Amino acid sequence: IQYRQDSIDNKYLINEGNRALGIFAAAAGTVVPTQISPQDVCFYILEGKMDINTDDKTFCMKQGDLLLIPKTSAFNLNFIENAKVLTVRF
């Protein structure tokens, strides 16, 4: 997985219907617009720093942090540093 200036590089290890396990990398300054997932989403920060913004809170995430976003919750991502993230959807 490589850092790319204007996009996110990702690799899915599992992607079956409502379940997915993937790793993605994003460069500092990358913003993922607000989205609503139909599944629960878990983010585990492998390296770097990012903010995960929900309707009512901002989570400042760093290496080793884990966050669960419940299904149907709105969230967006803001990468403060280059970051690699493990995601699980279920």
Image: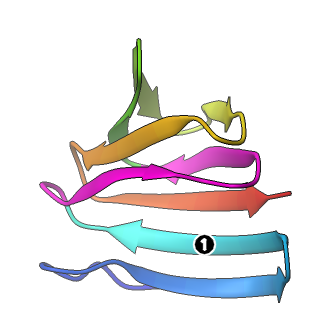
Q: Residue at x 79, y 73 (%)?
A: 20
Dominant SS of magenta comes to strand
In percent of width and height, residue 52 lies at 41, 35
In percent of width and height, residue 83 lies at 37, 57
The type of colouring in the image is rainbow
**Displayed quadrant of residue 12:** bottom right
Q: Circle 1 sits in a helix, a strand or a loop, which is it? A: strand
89 is higher (above) or lower (below) than 17: above
Of residue 81 and residue 31, the one placed in the foreground of this image is 31
Boundaries of the magenta span: 28-47
Q: Is residue 38 left or right of residue 59?
A: right
Q: Residue at x 79, y 85 (%)?
A: 15
In percent of width and height, residue 89 lies at 76, 59
Of residue 89 and residue 4, the one placed in the foreground of this image is 89
**Displayed quadrant of residue 67:** top right
**Displayed quadrant of residue 78:** top left
Of residue 68 and residue 26, the one placed in the foreground of this image is 68
Q: Residue at x 27, y 55 (%)?
A: 33
Decide whether residue 44 is among the magenta residues: yes
Q: Which residue is mark 1?
A: 23
Kind of residue at badge 1: Ile
In the rendered view of the protein, which quadrant contains the C terminus? bottom right
**Residue density around tag 1, few if under 14, some if 14–19, many if 20 or more, within 10 Å:** some
Q: Residue at x 60, y 31 (%)?
A: 65
Decide whether residue 10 is among the magenta residues: no
In percent of width and height, residue 72 lies at 64, 41
